[in-house]
Image (cartoon, rainbow, N blue to C red):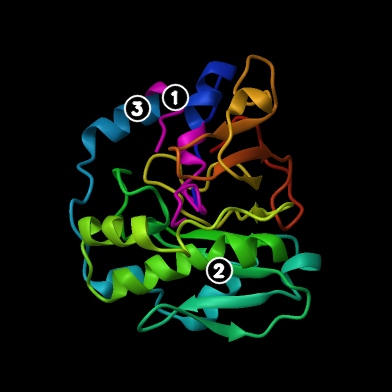
Amino acid sequence: MRKHRHSKASNGALSAAVAACARGLACAPAALALTVLATQTASAQAATQAPAVSMAPVAAYRMASRDDEIALARSAAPPSISGGAEILVLGEHGYETAVKGKNGFVCLVERSWFASFDDPEFWNPKVRGPDCLNPAAANSVLPANLERSRWVLAGMSRTEMLSRTRSSAVARQVPAPGAMGYMMSKEGHLSDTDGHWHPHLMLFQPHAALAGFGANLPGSPLLGQEGGPEEATVLFVPVGKWSDGTPASAQAH
């Protein structure tokens, strides 16, 4: 849902940073996030990194400790939200419930395949995107991400998954009104160039032009990714603090 990067960015660079914001959660129809270069330094780094063209061994995408994955998932949002959320962890065949919730929110650690199919980091085993979705997003955005995760762990190729996405009712589901997610963890790794990027909120919309929101315009605090005709439009709102309450520097990524 995906998917988040830029430091010392002008408004022009901020609009370029939007695509990477998709890496964290559902910026693709089958889902969070998430690649954009925000600075010349990031561009130089990306130019020297050869993206993975195929899936790494499944073990590379797993976290060594189930408890660590639960803690990382909770770090996506302030404790007042994530403390009562359902927590999902990556299992043998897909995401599974590790902690039952009581407030309707769902937190999980997204992997690289939550990004668009053409994203260069689609198979990057280092991606860890803590995300916490509100009830509307958990019911309308998350299911496509979970479906794709099951496909990945079943050994499907990107081509096979793309084909299934076109015929999947789950993948074509549009975001419900009010669907949004928190990505405020300072512990995540959203891309090899930008690490945890900035703490931010994501607002999911049925496909629509960004101009209608004023996103990515000079001076606008709102970022966005319009996506393809069948993809959700995702708006990104950078915030000033990490989920633990510590301030986030506007210069850091």
Image coords of residue 159 (percent x, y): 21, 56
Residue closest to the far top: 218
Q: Is residue 250 above or below residue 158?
A: above
Q: Secondary structure at mark 2?
A: strand
Viewer-side label of 3, 2: 2
User: Image point 51% across, 74% down: which residue?
Assistant: 69
Determine which of the numbered discs, if any, sits on residue 43 in the image.
3
Q: Majority secondary structure of the magenta segment?
A: loop
Q: Is residue 184 left or right of residue 52?
A: right
From the viewer's side, name the closer residue of 11 and 40. Answer: 11
User: Image point 62% across, 68% down: which residue?
Assistant: 107
What is the CA distance from the residue labelled 2 to the residue labelled 1?
Answer: 29 Å
Residue behind mark 1: 39
Q: Is residue 253 left or right of residue 246?
A: left
Q: Are marks 1 and 3 in contact (CB under 8 Å)?
A: yes
What is the CA distance from the residue labelled 3 to the residue labelled 2?
Answer: 29 Å
Q: Quadrant of residue 167?
A: bottom left
Q: Quadrant of residue 185?
A: bottom right
Q: Is residue 134 visible?
A: no
Q: Quadrant of residue 193?
A: top left
Q: Secondary structure at mark 1?
A: loop
Residue behind mark 2: 108
* Three-letter residue code for mark 2: Leu
From the viewer's side, name the closer residue of 80 and 206. Answer: 206
User: Image point 32% across, 71% down: which residue?
Assistant: 151
Q: Which residues are magenta?
A: 18-40
